[in-house]
Image: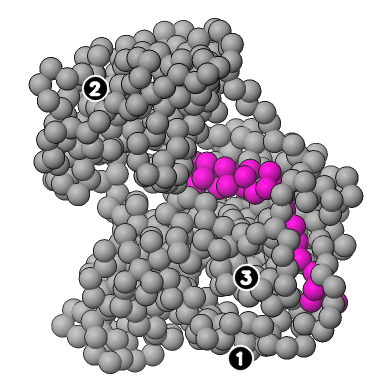
Amino acid sequence: MKSPRSRVEKFGTVLGVAPGNVAVYSSDYDSAEKSDYPDRRAYRSYVDGIFMGYKWQCVELARRWFYVNRQLVFDDVPMAYDIFRLRTIRRVSDDRPLPLYSFKNGSRRRPEAGSLLIWDAEGEFGITGHVAVVTEVHDNYIRFVEQNVENTLWPEERTFSRQLQASIAADGGYCIEPCFEGASILGWVIQSADDTFAEPVAEPDTALFSPLIASLEDTGQGGSPWVDTTRPAGKAYVSTYGHVMVSDSVNTCKYVCLSETACAQLKRATNELHHLFMRATDHVLQDDRLLRKFNIPVTIWPDIKASWNQRNSSMITGRFDFSISEMGLKAYEYNADSASCYFEAGQLQSDWAGHFRCRIGRDPGSDILQNLARAWKAQKINGILHIMQDVDVEETYHALFMKSAMEDGGLAVKVLNGVAGIRCSNGQIIDPDGIPIKHVWKTWAWETVFEQIRKETTGPLERNAPGLADILLHPEIQVFEPLWTAIPSNKAILPVMWELFPDHPYLLDSQFELTKNLRSSGYVKKPIVGRSGENIAIIDTDELILRKTDGRFGTHKRIYQRFCPLSQVEQMNIQVCTFSVQGSYSGVCVRVDPSLVIKGESDVMPLRIVSDEEYHKISGS
């Protein structure tokens, strides 16, 4: 049931008042006044000093309704659909946890006024899911209040946002129709001591976590071309590497398998960790004491803070590096700045599977290109988007793969190799063909810019031939990934994460100083801005060095992280990499190496996601 009024109201307008005297606001972000909401913090909603969420999202209303009416606050969640997994809610007066139970759509336990209605991440509510507060329950319909769906005023005397049709099944189950095409209602969450008909939240079976290596019959497929060279990225890749994916010909027909259970856990971890890394980034940028530990030139601090406040939603994509095994799932770091392997994940492993006729399981990177295109389209860039890359083979095919996503998103794109020919003119940065540079996607890490600033004393635009820092820090140039992504990409964020979220199941104990606990568990010493596995040292519990790598980052500050070994199969150490696009899981690939450290030259082996049943067959379990 939609409102008869169709005019979209300005951001922050009260659309109506829910039972319990809780206002419901318009969340039309396009109409938000920059003077009223100058930065990210202005969007944070508080009641009595307690954080409710971000104005005016669906989760914010749900938490605010519970606090105002029942003095209860549920935990922060990365996505609205994660509320369905919560099992406690906190009473503010004494900080006591009270039970929450979830009931799937069709349950014989009906929702009730004050319960939370939860949509899955599908259709209209893809990626995030949705939550609403139930106000009335009837045999043939249900009413509720919500934010961030319809930003129109309610008719006078109405006390709800929408209503949906409901029905009673033969077994007495209560069934709600989701209304929007493709949408799916998970069910409802009730604060109650009665768990009759409640859904159990089973922990995933970690016996299904470990990667497996499987082989196809070798009928000489590898002797013929198989990379799709009709795409520019494929052509660039083949010009250097040929039609191969792994360096050792013995592994030509081999691939890695992950179970659907493992993949679901990786998806959940990716979404949750992105959310936590963003919270940690905000925390660092509010505390200069912490920011100093990131070894970023002080002159850049105001720019980073402004980038976070003004462009916190402009991050396109990043990559998490994980260890996954029967011991669980642990994140090593978040490459939120200049991550690689998109071509391998989004095209190459699909090309491999097609040529070698791998029919087992599914391609785990099939959505990457489409999701990237959607992310670029959402940026609404007018004019040319310049890709700026170093003169490097890997960066070339990586840039061309991203270019195809940009063009699929409707953008005009131009590639620049290096900075030769770029000049300054009347305060603008001009490309070699005389076109002003206004928007940039770069393959360089922000640390490269910081290093230039440390070495130079000249300010921006004091030279006719600008350096990389002059270009990427120019106030009229919008850069992707934004400057603030230097914070979550810097490994100094890892001790901050552990301090903010101690003993989190996806995190490893990480510290700025070596502790007794780390010595007793074995640890890894990492430079805070290292790349490609350079300058890593792995030390065991007897202080013996298990592996040490050289590189360019030996003089940088270090952090210490608990040693969590990669899964090892057939003498191959397997690291799992997941990709986030606009903060949400988009795909996965694996990197393998006989060494304990994954390096820049480590192979990306084909990956397939198989059913749990197929996984058991392959493993022989």
Q: Is residue 486 magenta?
A: no
Can you give x and y, in whole percent of width and height, for residue 483 in the image?
38, 61
Asked whether residue 45 appears in the rendered view, the answer is no
Can you give x and y, in whole percent of width and height, for residue 7 in the image?
11, 41
238 and 278: which is toward the camera: 238
The residue labelled by disc 1 is 239
The amino acid type of the residue labelled 2 equals Phe
- Number of the label disc, if any, that sits on residue 350: 3
429 and 389: which is toward the camera: 389
Mark 3 or mark 1, earlier in chain:
1
Q: Is residue 257 magenta?
A: yes
Tag nearer the camera, 1 or 2: 2
Q: Is residue 104 left or right of residue 605?
A: left
Q: Quadrant of the N terminus?
A: top left
Tag nearer the camera, 3 or 1: 3
Mark 1 or mark 2, earlier in chain:
2
The amino acid type of the residue labelled 1 equals Ser
The residue labelled by disc 2 is 160
Q: Which residues are magenta?
A: 250-277
Q: Residue at x 37, y 44 (%)?
A: 181
Label 1: which secondary element: helix
